[in-house]
Structure formats: structure tokens, C-alpha cells
Image: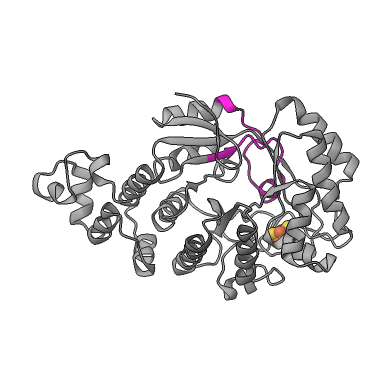
Amino acid sequence: MGCFREVFPGRGPESFREDGGNAALKAILEGPLGDLAEKVLEGRRLDRADGIRLGESNDLLALGFLADYARRCRVGDEVYFINNVHLNHTNICRNLCLFCAFGRTADAPGAYTLTIEEIAAKMEKVKACRPTEVHIVGGLNPALPFAYYEEVLATVRRILPEAHIQAFDAVEIDFLSEISGLSVEEVLLRLREAGLGSLPGGGAEIFNPEIRRRICPRKISGERWLEVHATAHRLGFRTNATMLYGHIESIADRVDHLLRLRELQDETGGFLAFIPLPFHPENTAFSHLPGTSGYDDLKTVALARLLLDNFFAIKSFWIMLTPKLAQITLSFGANDLDGTVREERIAHDAGAATPQYQPAQEFIAMIREAGRIPVERDTLYNVIRRYD
Ligand code: SF4
């Protein structure tokens, strides 16, 4: 980074102290976050203590200013969206994470598993919209054999041969390794044969083992999650990363989580996007918690952009944030609004009140209004169309 002179031509950070050329920046440099602002402006990497100070600061506009600067330096003014489809093949899950409103036992009301025929019918239905991505995640259903997953991929590939399939998060990949007796590497190679293109970022939650013990005791460890992604990267898969925030974790837990992701990204370069996921408490064991505030959502996006200096995309998942807040995150470090989605069950089971579909025209209008350039992308961030 360190592109200060490109963002503010003809000036160095010192000039703002001297002549007040930019009142907002001058105030930040002279305030309690001044030393951190200098680090960001000079493109120096932030450390754990810096992250905690930023996360604990209430100076939302300072965070936004710095994250917006970091975003401009790193990725410029283009904001991405994708024409995609979500497919949640089963909600039967043996893990029953306490924060999850989606997973349930096989005999619980509303439990379902889509047959291959039903999946084929769903794909036929969306064919006319020409989605460039099919995003598949679901529960850990002990009744399904490994062959089912291969068939799901093969079916999607047959009906939508042009679409990239992003499917099965690290938790599911680990589960498939367990039920098939294959190594993670073998699972990934078999799934690639069947049509798998990349891995979504789910299941990361918060890496701190103590928090994990309290919110998802049966889920794989954070270490294992990172290991699955490292293996996928080694095989040439690109993957995403997430963080579920706003439940019982501390700011330090969030910072540690982000730094672990940054560390792996330094090693492999395999992550495409980071997606902060605000916790939705409705219908979960934590329904007494209030959920995140808009303030916290914006701070978390900004923190991610500032700490994850080696990630290309910071994605705002409008389904969980609402389109209005997602639009504002574009001034707090985000450069991707994800997709048209069409049908989503996981966040909606937890009380997300957003619609299930947003057409491209709305993304274009939202992005333009924020003064940025809308770009339709594919899963791997290749440009499909730039709306100058
Ligand atoms: S978060 Fe995933 S693993 Fe946990 S219960 Fe929900 S579907 Fe299952």
C-alpha cells in the first residue's frame, strides 16, 4: 500500500498537520489514533495491538476514513457483484451449532434433504437467468453418502455447464473426508473431477477454541479449518474466508481471527475474499443476545480492510447486513456486494428479513450512488462487465 501521494496528489501525511489541507485527516492525525493513521498512510502493516486499539475505538469516521484509503490504494474504485444462485441441499446436521438456526435433526419439523432430481429441477428453473456461479452449502447429514456430493456437482455441471461451482465449506470437506475414508486432498481432487471450482469461506466462525467450545462444540477446530484451506490452496483451489462476529467473542478474538487469516494468506495467497458475517440470534440458543448494531457492522468491515492488507476483496453480504447498510460499507473498506442469490435459507432461518433476490440493476444503482464503478464479476474476480 502506501499510495498516499496517489490518493492525495502532491502531499505527504505531514502536510496535513502543517496546513490543514484535509480537515478530517488532520483531526485523525492529531487524535488518539494518529500514530495508527500514519502507519496506514505509509502502508506499514498493523499488528495485534493496533488491531485491538482500532477495534475498541469509537471513532467510527476515523476508521472509515482509513479503511476507505486502504481500499482505494489496494483495489481502486471498482465494486463487484455477481449473478449467482444459492443451493442449500440439506439442513439436517449432526453438529447442531448453538448459533445456527438452520441445522436440525432428521426428525425435527422442517428437516429436508433435496434429491438429485429436485436439485436438477431447481437448476433447470434458474437456467434462463444464466447465473455464472452456483454456491452450494448445507448441513452435515449422516445419511448421505459421498457419492451424493459427487452427483450434486455433476448434476449442476450438466445443467449449467458455464457456471462456476463454489461448494462445500471446510467443515463439510472435513466431514466428507471422514465418511469416505479419503484424505482431504483426495476428497478435493474427487470433487474437482465432478465439477467443484472453489470453496466458500463458511465454518470459520471465531478461531479461539474457548469461544468455539461455547458456540459450536462439535465443529472442527480453527486449526483444522485453516488446514483444509491450506490444502485446497496447495491444490490450486481459490477459497473465501469468513468470521461470525457479534455473539460472545471479544475484540481481541476478532483481531486474532483476522491475523490468522492474514498469516495463511501470506503463505499461500489462495484466499479471494473475506466476508464478515454478523450474527443473527433469532431461533438460536443465543436468542437472548441483541445481535450486532449498524455501528459494529461498519467498524468490523473497516477493521477487516485495515488488517487484511493481503486480501483483494472485502465482501459485504447484503443478505445479512441489509442492502442499505451494505451500501454504506462501500465507504468503510468493502469492494464487493456478493450476489443476486435468488434463494437463501441459512441467514433467513436465523431471522434475516432481507429479500431473497436482488437484481443486477439494483446493485448497479447502489454502487453508482456511492460514487464507485459497478463491475459484474465471476467467482474468481474476472470482469464480466464494467458499467462505466
Ligand atoms: S453452522 Fe453448519 S455445521 Fe453448524 S449446525 Fe449449522 S449447518 Fe451444521
Using the image as rendered, state which of residue 124 and residue 349 is in the foreground. 124
Quadrant, the C terminus: top left
Using the image as rendered, state which of residue 210 and residue 140 is in the foreground. 140
Q: Assess whether residue 355 is covered by the magenta stretch.
A: yes
Q: Quadrant of residue 81?
A: top right
Q: Tell me what residue is drawn at x 54 percent, y 30 percent.
A: 363
Residue 179 x, y percent position in the rendering: 84, 66
Res. 276 visible in picture: no
Using the image as rendered, state which of residue 324 and residue 227 is in the foreground. 227
Q: Residue furthest left?
A: 18
Which residues lie in the magenta part? Answer: 337-361
Res. 291 visible in picture: yes
Residue 380 x, y percent position in the rendering: 58, 43
Q: Tell me what residue is drawn at x 32 percent, y 54 percent.
A: 59
Residue 353 x, y percent position in the rendering: 63, 41
Residue 195 x, y percent position in the rendering: 76, 46
- Say if 284 sits above or below 368 in the image: below
Which SS does the magenta portion mostly show?
Answer: loop
Looking at the image, residue 3 sits to the left or right of residue 357; the answer is left
Question: Looking at the image, in which quadrant does ligand 1 appear?
Answer: bottom right
Q: How is this picture coloured?
A: one colour
Looking at the image, residue 271 sits to the left or right of residue 107; the answer is left
Q: Assess whether residue 203 is covered by the magenta stretch.
A: no
Q: Tell me what residue is drawn at x 71 percent, y 26 percent.
A: 129
Q: Tell me what residue is drawn at x 57 percent, y 56 percent.
A: 242
